[in-house]
Image (cartoon, rainbow, N blue to C red):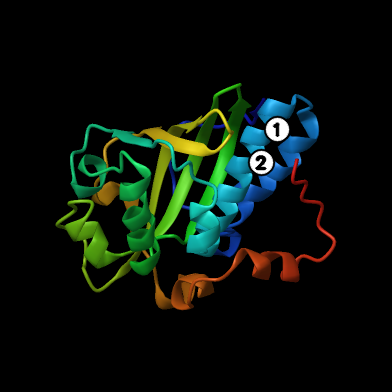
Amino acid sequence: MHDLADTHIAAPIDMAKFEPTRAARVANEHLKTITDPRRRKLLINFRDHALAECMGDYDALMATCSQKRQSYVVHSPTSNEFSQHQPQSYEELLPHYKALIDLNMYVIHTEIKKLTVGDDELFIDVSHHQIIPGEMAVNVYSIPEADPNAVYEMYARLWVVFIFDEDGMGAGEHAYSGVTSIDNLRRLEDHEIPAQYKSSPAKVADFFAANPGIEWPSE
């Protein structure tokens, strides 16, 4: 179990500290503490899923997902397009992640406070920071006060249970969050917007090219 004591109140972060690959790096470091083959397989899948998602590498992302079954659920007091329409099969997951990348909503910084790996599930308690266009804040997250022409940092404290199939492939995510509102958004000045948000999606291979010699076990 990876455990960092921290407040449960979400807050924005300094964009200079915004690091999309942080969750994958933490998971990779935590892998050093796990010896059980099944639990290692789950953690490796989570790590590779997190890396592919934050890079916007659609093919690598889908390669971490089970084609047998999927169950995505968002438990939140706020009802909106995002929380109401979650994929329940691999076929539904394909356009879900494609849209996430196409809409430029994959630029994220996930600060892991607690990480626990079981035999069939993996739990994380995180401070989640996502760069989103104002148009999505209005139309997807139902925040009418947002400026559709602006860019925002959306921040929240989340608890997420990742589910895996018998082969150790990702089979779903059950997320628990608080209310989503204008209070969870910080409008970014142009100089604060991460460079990744203004560029095209990258490949996982680009990460390894930029980090030669990094230890990244496959089993």
- What amino acid is at disc 1? Arg
Question: Which image quadrant for residue 35?
Answer: top right
**Could you tell me which residue is drawn at 33 percent across and 67 percent down?**
103
**On screen, residue 105 above or below 219:** below
Are the residues flagged by discs 2 and 1 in contact, CB closer than 8 Å? Answer: yes
On-image quarter of the N terminus: top right
* Residue at the limit of the structure toward the left, as seen here: 144
Which of 150 and 84 lies nearest the eye of the viewer?
84
Question: Going by the image, does 177 lie left or right of 162?
Answer: left
Where does the image place residue 170, in percent across and percent down from the top left?
51, 39
Q: Which residue is mark 1?
A: 40
Residue toward you, 95 or 151: 95
Q: Residues within 10 Å of mark 1 (few under 14, many from 20)?
A: many
Residue 145: image quadrant is bottom left
The residue lying furthest to the right in this view is: 213
Mark 2 is on which residue type? Ile
Quick one: SS at disc 1? helix
Q: Position of residue 95 (x, y in %)?
A: 32, 57
Q: Which mark is residue 44?
A: 2
Give the side of residue 157 with respect to residue 25, left or right.
Answer: left
Say if residue 93 shows up in the picture: yes
